[in-house]
Amino acid sequence: MDSLAYLLAALTPYHIALAIGGVVAGTVVGSLPGLTATMAVAVLIPITFSMEPASALILMGAIYTGAIYGGAYAAILLNTPGTPSAIATTFDGYPMAKRGDGDLAITLACIASVCGGLVGALFLLFLAPPLANVALAFGPVEYFWLAILGLTLISALSQGNLLKGLIGACFGLLLSCIGVAEISADVRLTFGSHTLLGGIEVVSALIGLYCIPVLIDLVATPDRHLEVEDVSRGFRLREALGISWRSKFNLARSSVLGTLVGILPGAGGSIAGLVAYSEARRASKQQRHFGHGAPEGVQATESANNATVGGGFIPTLVLGIPGTPPDAVILGALLIQGVRTGPNLFTEHGSIVYVFIWGLLIATVLMLPTGLFIGRYAYRFIVTVPKALLVPTVAFMTLIGTYAIRNSVSDVVIMIVLGVVGWILGRLGFSASPIVLGLILGSIAEQGFVQGWIIGAAADNLWGEFFGRPIAMAIFAFILLSLFSPLLLSRFRVKREIAGAD
Amino acid sequence: MLTFKRLILAPLCAVLLMLSAGAIAEYPEKPISYVIPFGPGGESDITARHQQPFFKNKFGQDLVISYKPGGGGAVGWAQLNEMPGDGYNIMGVNLPHIIVKPLQKDVGFKTSDLALIYMFHYTPDAVVVKADSQFKTLKDMIDYAKKNPGKLTFSGSGKGTANHLAQVTFDKLAGIKTTYVAFKGTGASVTALLGKQVGAQWGYTSVGAKHSDKVRLLAVAMEQRHPRFPDVPTFKELGFDIVSGAYRGIAMPSSTPEEVRVKLSAMIGRINADGEFKKRMENDGFALVDVDYKGMKAFMDEKKAGYAAAAKEAGVIK
Amino acid sequence: MPTEAQCRDTGGIIVAAIFIFIGVLALWDTFDYTDADSFVFPRTVAGAMIVFCIALIAWSLVRPIDAATRGAESTPRRVGLVAAMLVAALLMPYAGFLLSGLLAFAAIVWLAMYDPWTRRRLIVYPLVGSAIVLGFYFLFTRVLLVPLPIGRLFIG
């Protein structure tokens, strides 16, 4: 049997060492805000020149998947997504940590990440060529509607005052326009400032809006950062496994959603996490708990974002179109090694592709022990280190991490300013998440809209372009569902309560 | 402010130069930082990565590639001259970007601010269609566009770019009207073509090389046919005077001493002359050019005039 | 008259007014664009933001909100933290990353210190702090090859 041979080729000590090393390095990189999977993989490229393509892929894939998981640590413990993929992890992860369940949240995130990673990699293993077509079926209009679907989360995230959420989202959307426009090359909203020419870098904005307010409040009181009852409680693995088993449908749905979004070249881990979070919330019987430390929220996001790893490799390897930014780097590395991607890669170069996919599966499984272990240390560090060292350490990390994204001092200044703005707004009831949502989804919504408009106008069929395509309509239906299901559900419940009257 | 800085910096540099004159004889003696003003995975990145191993082989030092994306390259170029001019900081530059952007608005740098060292390759513009497209030749396409003005959509990378300027020029020369849909990079623009969101693409020869099983090139904007695509005619053969594409090269901070500039120029030239490098680049659809430090001024003067006129025609500059 | 438990959302009104100003500024900026594709989106968003802000102001004038109660918090320390970080960022190009990072770290240790300074802490904290800063500095410059600013002071 062929696949057995590939599995054995992936199981050599050398490859297992690469997988462990990659996952560990990736987890550490991902947990530091500002260091992204893209950057970690890019740094590695010169090392992979001297490797076999399959080994190089295993190493890069392991780093990538580890980094996506590592992003959860900072999200849970510091309310700061370590990578953009973990944005939605902060919504429930940080409230969990605040009430003393940080260790549980990290273990849950680890289990969910492994589940998502496995689902994504299995889709890659068995269904890559047909699924790659999903990447092509998504045109500008579909991306536009996907961004709008993401924006419907505002209603869930604005914490009481929808108007404030909407204003925040508009502010975020405007922030996304600053700088030289990605397509039209126009200089927008810089008001003559050279600092703003490069636009607001998303990762630095995330660090500013989420982490700086936490630091500002930490320094103001002598209270401990997180509640701790008993530091030596262990992993709480049994408890976490029980919760994971109970939300197996949530994990499965989020993993599949994550894989599908990962296939889309214009989306990526952050959108996958947000979409899965919003669907988990919509499907849950306890919507009120979301945003206040619901384990399902963490599970949905973490399984979806790790599923994008396998999902993203599908168009990368089948079509030569990178599914996510780290995939773009990996694709470049493969090109330089002389490996041509395409459907032939699967039939003619099975020894590369299948050995790699098995290696990715192995790395994902290895993430369970290593992730639990590193997570334990991260948690211990954050809860036991004295405040007078925790605050400067985190502050220093935000400085160095923001600088490193694109080697820019301007980004550091923008990050701090946004942080102060975010803190003030937060005090007045404008939460940061709608702003972040606007910032992330802005360029996708704008590009999709403008391109869709031009294409529709050229075909004299604007209506058909926006409302006549099947996938676009399916997403549109989900938008309506997310907007109106809370209303319908509550009415339904009221009726039932009256009818049941118990 | 600038002159003040120069007043202080110039003598300092001179002193440093004298101190390190011996060292420069062995340039490079440590790794060189190579900044790409775009994100990873794009063509600027990939061609720099192609240079990486050859540089190490020939000169014994690493090229350390890092990214400074933003503003379509403007963020990086605006900061180039603030970097130390010790010869260990170099940056990728792209045409027509460095010519068109400063003409549009104040983007923090002027074309003349950049100390260009070498243009090492270019990616020729090409008209790309899907392999199953109804257009077999460029003539099929022109006929269709003549019958349906505005209906034929082209995807392309950005506005004010090589793709966009080529589209405008071609429309004028062929007497047709087509619709240009800008995407945020060549990758996104190819995806739109493969997904049939658009009828055709203004892409590059490298698109044909990367997706050879799924697309067909109708014409390439080169003087002679590309060795990788011997069957694809040039626009010139078909009667349209278009030779264009995106040029890529290397620049250094303007404080870099003349001696080092000449040295680096010669080094990049040696990589370009390597048979294996040439083979790899051409296999990916790129075309090598050799514009060295000495020939740069004449080359840029010619390109500046050409691109400025095309950009005005395209309406990206007023 | 607002009571102790409920009050008018003055902060919200002020923020909404500022956002209206930002929206108008953005609208004004859009008339400067060369390309038709580039103003549709910001103009729509800025317009929507202004409408939402007006709605919020109207709403806040009618509806009082619950007054938030806050415990003892130190504003000077907050301002100090932000100032320390900003100074470090602005100092970076001149003093280099290492020096400005160390200075910011030291300043923030001092700002975040609520426990008494014992002799042990006086020795341990600076040591641990330097180790963290140096450790990250080497991780970033040597392993991840990030060109952190060296500082013009040191390279002339």
Image (cartoon, coloured by chain):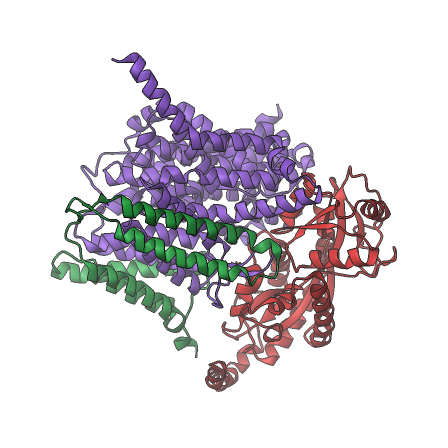
Chain colours: A purple, B red, C green
Nearer to the camera, A180 or C54? C54
Nearer to the camera, A98 or A391? A98
Q: Toward which corner of the image does residue B197 lie, by quadrant? A: top right
Nearer to the camera, B40 or A435? A435
Q: Residue at x 28, y 37 (%)?
A: A96
* In the image, residue A340 above or below residue C133: above
Image position, residue B71 (x, y; %): 55, 60
Nearer to the camera, B176 or A292? B176
Residue A34 visible here:
no
Apparent side of residue A53 relative to residue C4 in the rendered image (left or right): right
The C terminus of chain B: image quadrant = bottom right
Residue A169 visible here:
yes
* In the image, residue A99 above or below residue B224: above
Apparent side of residue A423 relative to residue A171 in the rendered image (left or right): left
Image position, residue A139 (x, y; %): 62, 39
Q: Residue at x 47, y 63 (%)?
A: A196
Image position, residue C115 (x, y; %): 13, 56
Image position, residue A281 (x, y; %): 39, 30
Q: How many marks?
A: 0
Q: Toward which corner of the image does residue B294 lie, by quadrant? A: bottom right
Q: Residue at x 64, y 31 (%)?
A: A129
